[in-house]
Amino acid sequence: MEGRESRRANDIFFVCSLVDYIARKTKNRRSDVVEALGPQRLGRIVELADVYHCDNIDAVSDHFIEEADIGEGVFDNVAAARYAVPSHWDIGKVYKRLVLAIADREGTTDVEAILRAYCSPVSALIDDYNGSFYYDSPEAIYDAYATGELE
């Protein structure tokens, strides 16, 4: 028995949480982080997520910030938040559901789905902690992604 979720879902959850952690730490948009990491590095992170998950996320993030040469940005959605800020694990779960839906419904790889999710207009809505979009159902978030109808 694998547990409540498949290994694949757990690995994607870790990768998405790591992306959010790096973005917060470097004050970059999530799309900028996944673009800096690139498909090959993202693939390696997905493949070894169960190993990286056992390490301290601060150390793992430092490693990839340095390796991908991710500089300091100016996007700070945490400081701009007027309400309670969801954790990087909370937002990782939102993105995980979107990534899995994209991969499964569009027949793409998990890495391609990660890139599509983070580089879509929906990403800005998820990362707006003053809004409530990230609280929407996974189906509603995917539908907004798929149709481009952003409210």
Image (cartoon, rainbow, N blue to C red):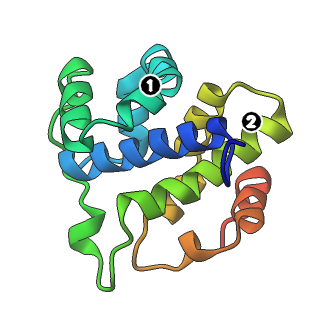
Instruction: Say what secondary structure mark 2 lies in.
Output: helix
The 10 Å Cα crowd at callout 1, few under 14, some 14 to 19, many 20 or more, is many
**Residue type at numbered disc 2:** Ala
The residue beneath circle 1 is 45
Residue at 44% of width from left, 25% of height from top? 45
**Residue type at numbered disc 1:** Ile
The 10 Å Cα crowd at callout 2, few under 14, some 14 to 19, many 20 or more, is some
Residue at 20% of width from left, 43% of height from top? 58
The residue beneath circle 2 is 103
Percent coordinates x, y for residue 90 in the rendering: 46, 64
- Quadrant location of the N terminus? top right
The CA distance from mark 2 to mark 1 is: 17 Å
Q: Is residue 96 above or below residue 37?
A: below
Percent coordinates x, y for residue 63 in the rendering: 21, 26
Instruction: Say what secondary structure mark 1 lies in.
Output: helix
Question: Is label 2 or label 1 in front?
Answer: 1
Quadrant for residue 103, please give it: top right
Percent coordinates x, y for residue 14 in the rendering: 46, 43
